[in-house]
Image (cartoon, rainbow, N blue to C red):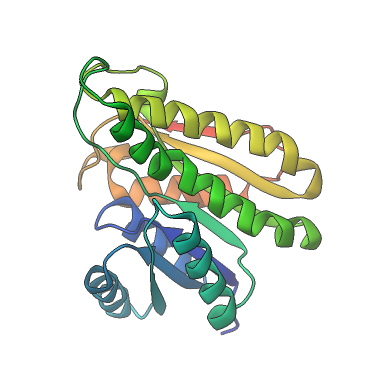
Amino acid sequence: MASAGVCVVVGVGPGIGQAVARRFGREGYSLGLIARKKESLAGFVETLATTKIKAKGFPADAESAPSLGDALKAVEHDLGSIDVLIYNAAVAKPGGPLEVGIEQLVREFRVNVGGALVCAQHVAAGMRHRHQGTILFTGGGLALSPWSPMSSLSIGKAGLRSLAITLNQDLKKDGVRVGTVTVNGIVKAGGGALDPDAIADTFWELHQQPADSGEVERVVA
């Protein structure tokens, strides 16, 4: 079967990231998985292979723009032009606004928002040229209801939501879908709408919407 295209998942983990990769893989997409640890990537590739889904891992540090850029270039070299970008990377460390230092805030912002910007900028030119493509982010309910004990992540998710909305304003006219799946609750297996596979279905549904549909955000809870 011919590939439906190339889907890259940045920040693959055992929850949402792996579920989204599996969902797009079932639809025929060639998968490029990006995460920091080679060993973890190998495990995710092997797990997907048990369901006859082929994927390839590309290690990168989401805090580093050059590292992400190199990984995305490697995906394009090995798999082809990127048709779908899913950004799922995040740092979730506790700390109130009077406790979090500026260095910690900036470092975590680089992952929570900066990495998404770097990846979106990398794929946007090709998608605009082809007049098609999808950029989706894993958002969080903290963007809607900030929580003091997780102040850095609250700031990050608010920034990520704004990035999705502004990217959509710039790219929808070129046929590029941009959106965020705002996960408002604790992700867990068997958790209804918060089950990783259910969240992955939401990503797929948002991906299928026309670029100019006006639907930039889906909130799952």
Percent from the top left, x then y, of residue 215?
A: 62, 33
182 and 158: which is toward the camera? 158
Which picture quadrant has residue 155?
top left
Position of 79 with respect to 153 (left or right) is right
Task: Tally the numbered discs.
Answer: 0
Which picture quadrant has residue 50?
bottom left
Instruction: Kindly identify the residue that appears in the image at 80 percent across and 42 percent down.
Output: 173
Percent from the top left, x then y, of residue 23?
A: 42, 61
Position of 123 with respect to 89 (left or right) is right
89 and 54: which is toward the camera? 89
Instruction: Kindly identify the residue that appears in the image at 34 percent across and 18 percent down.
Output: 146
Percent from the top left, x then y, of residue 167?
A: 65, 38
13 and 26: which is toward the camera? 13
Percent from the top left, x then y, of residue 87?
A: 46, 50
Instruction: Kindly identify the residue that appears in the image at 31 percent across and 80 percent down.
Output: 49
Instruction: Kindly identify the residue that appears in the image at 70 percent across and 50 percent down.
Output: 176
